[in-house]
Amino acid sequence: MANQYVDMDSLKYLLYDIHGFEDVLNQEHFADYDREAVDMFLTSVKDFSDQKLYPTFQDMDKHAARFEDGKIIVPPVVETVMKEGGELGLISACFSFEDGGLQMPLTAMTAAYYIMDAANNHLPGYLGLTQGAAELIVEFGSEELKAKYTPKMLTGDWAGTMCLTEPQAGSSLSDITTSATPSDDGSYKIKGQKIFISGGDHEYVDNVVHLVLARIDGAPAGTKGISLFVVPKNKIQDDASLTSNDVITAGDFQKMGQKGYCTTHLIFGEQDDCQGWLVGEPNQGLKYMFLMMNGARIAVGRGGAGICTAAYYASLEYAKERPQGRRLSAKGTKDVNQEQTLIINHPDVRRMLLLQKAISEGSLSLVTLTSIYADLYQTVTDPEEKEKYYLLLELLTPICKTYPSEDGMRSINNGLQVLGGYGFCSEYILQQYYRDIRIFSIYEGTTGIQSLDLLGRKVAMKGGKALMLLANEMKETMKDASTYDDLKPYAAKLGAKLQLTQDVLGHLSQFAMKGDYERYIADATIFMEFFSKVVISWLWLQMATHSKHALVTANMDYSEEFYNAKIHTMKFYFKYELSRTSSLAEILKDQDVLTIPNEEEVFA
Amino acid sequence: MANQYVDMDSLKYLLYDIHGFEDVLNQEHFADYDREAVDMFLTSVKDFSDQKLYPTFQDMDKHAARFEDGKIIVPPVVETVMKEGGELGLISACFSFEDGGLQMPLTAMTAAYYIMDAANNHLPGYLGLTQGAAELIVEFGSEELKAKYTPKMLTGDWAGTMCLTEPQAGSSLSDITTSATPSDDGSYKIKGQKIFISGGDHEYVDNVVHLVLARIDGAPAGTKGISLFVVPKNKIQDDASLTSNDVITAGDFQKMGQKGYCTTHLIFGEQDDCQGWLVGEPNQGLKYMFLMMNGARIAVGRGGAGICTAAYYASLEYAKERPQGRRLSAKGTKDVNQEQTLIINHPDVRRMLLLQKAISEGSLSLVTLTSIYADLYQTVTDPEEKEKYYLLLELLTPICKTYPSEDGMRSINNGLQVLGGYGFCSEYILQQYYRDIRIFSIYEGTTGIQSLDLLGRKVAMKGGKALMLLANEMKETMKDASTYDDLKPYAAKLGAKLQLTQDVLGHLSQFAMKGDYERYIADATIFMEFFSKVVISWLWLQMATHSKHALVTANMDYSEEFYNAKIHTMKFYFKYELSRTSSLAEILKDQDVLTIPNEEEVFA
């Protein structure tokens, strides 16, 4: 294993120097926190990760979660994580004081979980889903439900899950069939099956509180008839003791990665004895779920960023230690009598490492900024400001979910290549990162679905206002960058790409206006690939501009190398990644219609 | 498991209709073969693959090759493959009659192995390396060595390996240190360690004949002092019995994929009792090895093409059976009262499947053509023709090795995504293809090394003659395509990309001419990405033009759908893949120098 999996300086640089996290801390709601308090929290999470999470990472891959004798077996570190993570406030962090929480910003929790994701991505989900399930109850449930379930969830004594997917419906939630039949006592009888339930069952908590989407008998078809229920694994009796609630674990999906994080198949009400309690109003379940979804999607992006960061440091360490071959002389010859050089000195290896650095820090920047927008949206009071952060949050969320997952894979793929044959060997950690990250582009809505969301909903939101607000932010950065002669060309490049974005959208919107919506949206995934590179370029230009300013003014919190490396990596991203948007725009503007089914049989 | 892993029609279409394999069969050297004979051979290999290889594919992943009590344990199907594969002629196919072979074209063997790669990529290497090792002996060894070793290798009673890599040297063969000390009897004492030796040891053959690169005492430093030796696991005694030759198996590398194909660590001469016999002349070992390398590199590309073909059919089968969601109406709405549609009808899924089809058939076309060039180079007698095929072979080989490996990964990555969450589950086969193919961009010279070969050697060969010859072939296709109005725009696009290739090379060659070779070559991998897409586009335009001709003349050996699908896929490749070369050219022409090490510390 590598010695380093995360760089705390780069994380804090993004939080405070680049994205002005102090603006969030200055909000009344977060009055109990300042930079020092947050840094202390992050240090304790880093210590916890160093001591408990990172050392078990390879082991969790070797001893996968599994289903045996009707039970899910997970490694004992899950108990540590639930208990000590609960004590550290990793479940309760963002709840208000009144709800038993620490009233901390989401951004602080995102930073903390990012460290844990980098240390051991199999574990944070156990805490994160418990937090998410409790959040749904707190946000939309009755006082009774809140009182009954959330205290033990916030401490980690009980776990929580989200139960959406059913075998026959997959991503198409309008087709779920789990049923809820009203009982006289105000509860519902739940009946149905849910699959791919992360953290769905294990022996290290006394109860698992499932938040289940189901249809009340007679509810309208489609998404309009879906309600949300609390369905505990064990019912709470009047004397507070627990008794089985007819929630059966039917299996654990075996996977190519993230093996220590169980993925269960649950059956509700096989004995007709599964009780559920409605959260909020009937038929509003999907709305509630989606109000929480931004958080879940930021969490997936954060996970992708964490894993590809850890992979970057592992590749870097190898490249700095491994001698092989010699540098080419200017004339293209090599002197075999010289010592071998370290592979980090080969341009192709350097290119791969810079790609890893650029993608992992770019991803972290995006995740951090999106979290900050979420915090500001929650806490600012001025309605215009609130709308601004709402729109920016909505626009960035699908990108924040997708970019770190998709380009995170590319990044780790390059990182594995740095190690040559060793990269493919189980003994080295790169191959585990390579396998683990593969699920992130599927979790919480696949890349295809995020892309439909981005191009189909977000870009057009409020007549394009979200996009305009983001463009304004970008222009601000370009203006700052242009004050430095050597950054000016990069600002101009970004400006041109912003213009190209308008061109592309102008081209596509013709189809939407003609009513050919299927064509408008057909290449949404290509648009995602295009636009996310524009956004990440902007974030790198922010870093380069700030670094330049620090160097010029000699007002430096970090080393000169630190700032120079940011500027260098910005240039790298512009040359090797932003350039790729020219072609993506070509694809988006191409007139051939090739992926919309017609009479022609392409797959005979 | 999917029902189909390969399409014999597409294979034969490429062989006969597109690449004119009959021109090879018409060579005197192959007088014993005609289309019927080759087809019978391929049918028997397909049957063998259906019955013995494909059914054990998932199992080999679950029961990895391993090292136990000093022995390598592999699944028993390896015995079947060596014996029955030997009987089928899968080792001896390409050897001349005089050397005990079947005197078959490489192209026929490539097609046969492609079927096996698609069926079960863990197995063909056991046969292929035995073939390669025997080929080195036949080509460069003495009559005595040939007589002693090759007969039993050609039947599969004995196996063969190639021993290049050493722990401290990796890809840098100039740094190997395995030593060879002359003995009085004309043999050499061999001492050293080799790692990553595929098929290096197992119980299902009586002997393993290692072809080992080593340095004779006092040999010059670097690649000029490397010799090639036959080093059998067991020595042959005068009475033909076998006795140990002090070749110790020290371990088996555990890997993330291709787990059934053992990857051994061998120690030669630990007891000072390991005998080796020189092949050919001293200090010529690397030259011999590299004369065989084209074949090995075509084989890697072929493997990549095979795996991504199998993955394509697995994704396609799923997409044709899995209902989920509904098509968007023109207005962008969905009617939940309608039945769910099959996912193949969603444009994004269709895009991913078309990408898989385009990459896997494009790869197969490249592999087939490269093999044909190899056959023609071996057999034509006219010196000018011979040079032409030699140059085309040399130019295409690094691309043939790299494109199916690299874009094969992208293809399978998309194929896994087609299955959503199931794609990540061990129960479904996509994740195995995803893991297995990952080694192909590392085998036999990584992508980085192939790219240095392409841009550093091949493009400049004989003053650029290889490239000119290839451009002529492309222009021929463009001319043919231009006779059809609807193909004309694609021919023009390809022409423009050929021009762009010249521009890019013109730009880069400035640096070579100025003597800044390191800069000339720094982005070789980007050039590989660029140029391979141009080449594959050409190959698709060939298919589209031929298909168009068949449709127009109603001279059809296959269905109308078959030909229409080829034309459709060509258009898809041009829109979604060839377009990407614009950006790659931008990168190659960019003035920023960011990956050549200088004083600046980027990775502090």
Image (cartoon, coloured by chain):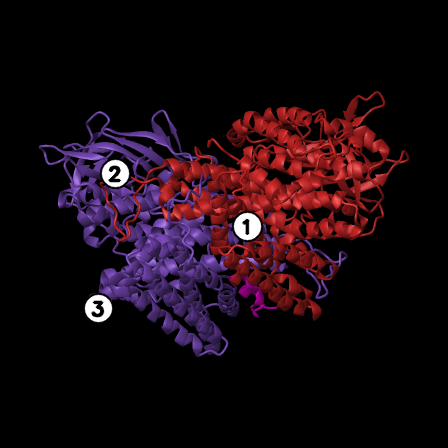
Chain colours: A purple, B red
Instruction: Determine whether the residue tagged by mark 3 lies in a helix, strand or loop.
Output: helix
Instruction: Considering the whole magenta stretch, tell me its main secondary structure.
Output: loop
Q: CA distance from mark 3 to mark 1?
A: 59 Å
Residue B588 colored in magenta in the image: yes
Residue that label 3 marks: A384
Q: CA distance from mark 1 to mark 2?
A: 47 Å
Residue that label 1 marks: B545
Kind of residue sitting beneath label 3: Glu
Please report whichever mark, 3 or 2, sits nearer to the chain's N-terminal start. 2
Give the chain letter at badge 2: A
Residue that label 2 marks: A176
How many neighbours does mark 2 have within 10 angstroms: few (below 14), some (14-19), or many (20 or more)?
many
Nearer to me, B449 or B365 = B365
Most distant residue in the right direction:
B184
Q: Are marks 3 and 1 on the same chain?
A: no
Is A425 displayed left or right of A529 in the figure? right
Is A30 displayed left or right of B393 in the figure? left
Most distant residue in the left direction:
A184
Q: How far across and down, in percent of the image, does residue B321 sit?
A: 38, 35
Q: Which residues are magenta?
A: B583-604
